[in-house]
Image (cartoon, grey):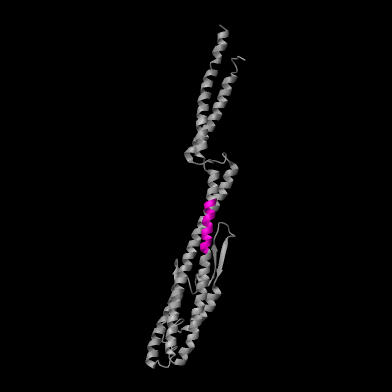
Amino acid sequence: MLSLHTNNAALSAQNSISKTQNSLSTSMTRLSTGYRINSAMDDAAGLQIATRLNAQTSGMAMAMRNTQNSISMMQTAEGSFNEVTNMLVRMKDLATQAADASSTTADRTGMQSEFDALGTELSNVMNNTTFGGSKLLKGGTIATAMTFQIGASSAETMTVDLSAQVATTLEASLTAASSNYLAPNVAGTELATGTSASAMIDKLSTAISDVGTVRSALGAAGNRLDHINNNLSNIGTNTKAATGRIMDVDYAAESSNMTSNQMLLQAGTAMLKQSNSMSSMVMSLLQ
């Protein structure tokens, strides 16, 4: 129907152009940002899922840093305990030598001097080893129950409790192994006689065994943290991939959509121009 008041063709063309412009704008936005979802209006459900996945990924990345820091802390403690073991072994050698009848009083005096120095250093290592400015061994982090945050949720924790081994068992055996452990830089009497030196051999063996127990526990915990870190890395990689499948734009498909919308916009503009000529056809009927 030819009408001066209502140009149905022009209205249809304008409506089509408006829709095409919106689609073209969306395609250009996606191609410029690289994201399929740039606002909640693009995909409300997808954005919600991707946001949760991003939060999980970020939390796991921080948990991975936690595991690395915890492993470093345990390696620091284990290294200190390794040196403690070396000193105890040397002290045991001295006690074994002093217990022999061939050792003279002068020999035992020299051995006692070295024994005292090693005992003093045991006290220094156990009391002054730190990690990040905090005490690590005696009265420190390792001597208490430790809780490690190993995941993105509050339930993902790992507890290592060496308090009994360090604060009770090991502390008692080190105290028995050297009088200089509790009172550094004093003259001891552990190797003064063959009998007293012989008694120290078993005490030092016990201390060495107790240190080994703690080192073994630290190594086991460190290995577990290393496996946790590897697992977090795998999960994080897959979670990022899942987020990308939701959020990232498919450039091939979106480029095709943009080209199609550009062609539709050109065609719609041409048709709008043609529809506007309908009024001239009406006027020709009145001539």
* Quadrant where the N terminus is found in the figure: top right
Residue 229 covered by magenta stretch? yes
Say which residue appears at 54% left-offset and 51% top-offset: 238
Residue 10 covered by magenta stretch? no
Say which residue appears at 52% left-offset and 75% top-offset: 213
Q: Residue furthest top?
A: 287
Answer above or below: position of 172 versus 155.
below
Q: Position of residue 205 (x, y in %)?
A: 49, 82
Q: Residue furthest right?
A: 1
* Quadrant where the C terminus is found in the figure: top right
Q: Which residues are magenta?
A: 225-238
Answer above or below: position of 217 versus 94.
above
Q: Where on the picture, by quarter, is residue 106?
A: bottom left
Q: Position of residue 210 (x, y in %)?
A: 51, 78
Q: Position of residue 231 (x, y in %)?
A: 54, 58
Say how many tags the image has.
0
Answer above or below: position of 31 versus 211.
above
Q: Main secondary structure of the magenta part?
A: helix
Could you tell me if residue 282 is visible in this image? yes
Q: Nearer the viewer, residue 153 or 266?
A: 266
Is 70 on the left-hand or right-hand side of 46? left
Is 70 on the left-hand or right-hand side of 154? left
Q: Nearer the viewer, residue 135 or 158?
A: 158
Answer above or below: position of 125 versus 226.
below
Say which residue appears at 58% left-offset and 60% top-offset: 156
Could you tell me if residue 135 is visible in this image? no
Q: Position of residue 182 (x, y in %)?
A: 46, 81
Q: Nearer the viewer, residue 251 or 126?
A: 251
